[in-house]
Image (cartoon, helix red, strand yellow):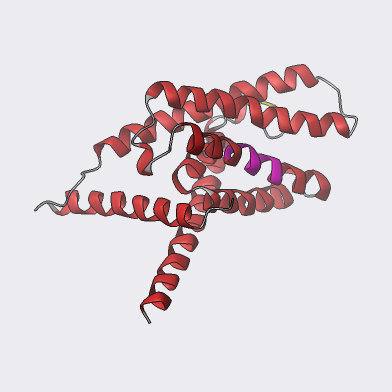
Amino acid sequence: MEEQFTAMSSLRLHFWSITGTLIAFLISLWINQEVFTHTSFVRGINWIFLPSGVRLLSTLLVGFDGFVGLLVGGLLMDFFYWFPHDPVRAIAGAILGSMAPYLVYRLALERYELKASLTNLTPKRLLVLSVVYSVANPLLHHIWFALRGNMQNIAESFFMMFVGDLTGALIMLYTMKGILALLPKQPSNSRMSNRMFSIQLALSSAYTNQLATKPT
């Protein structure tokens, strides 16, 4: 009975981690379109791209669950907004856009022994991970573009995607790192502090949950 309860709790954590990532990703896309639409180079490539920050942040916080949430969000946006008439481009874009931050998460897990709520990620480490992600994401996309024979403005497109991913990642990561640092480490008599402590517990539980079931 206890094992069944633990399994159900784990499934709920996976569900909320995936759902939370999906919602955060879609909201960040909407904000980016509303605020930074004038920075667009081509469809889907901006000088500032906040969803890149959400991609990297969500995988660092909840690992494979973040990858799944990003993949679902990417498929929804690509099929219904970005590339509704190009299913191959839609599927490839969603997979590549989700794969790059997950690979960086795996790197952080092995190299920095990543801990819950990014507690051991210093500003320098956040910068390194942001740069690595901002190279990996456009690299994967532009390798795929080249394989399809699309070489038009490829260097300029790569550079702009790199800048957009880097600015978006830095904005989101440093903002969230600051917020997470303010979360209380133990409950108190304050209702607000207890709510913030609950967020801390939820993130730690989600992180522990995805580590326990991470693919090898």
Which residue ends up furthest to the left in the rendered image? 189
Residue at 60% across / 38% down in the picture?
103
**Residue 85 visible (yes or no):** no
**Residue 120 visible (yes or no):** yes
Residue at 55% across / 43% down in the picture?
30
Between 119 and 158, the one nearer to me in the picture = 119
Q: Say if 102 sits above or below 216 in the image.
A: above
| Residue 63 percent coordinates (x, y) | 51, 47
| Residue 16 percent coordinates (x, y) | 45, 60
25 left or right, relative to 159: left
Which is the main secondary structure of the residues drawn in magenta? helix
Residue at 51% across / 58% down in the picture?
213
Between 112 and 159, the one nearer to me in the picture = 112
Count of numbered marks: 0
Give yes or no for residue 100 being in the magenta stretch: yes
What span is in magenta?
A: 95-101
Q: Say if 128 sits above or below 216 in the image.
A: above
Residue at 65% across / 29% down in the picture?
136
Which residue ends up furthest to the right in the rendered image? 149
Q: Quadrant of the N terminus?
A: bottom left
Between 95 and 111, the one nearer to me in the picture = 111
| Residue 192 percent coordinates (x, y) | 18, 50
Between 163 and 214, the one nearer to me in the picture = 214
95 left or right, relative to 1: right
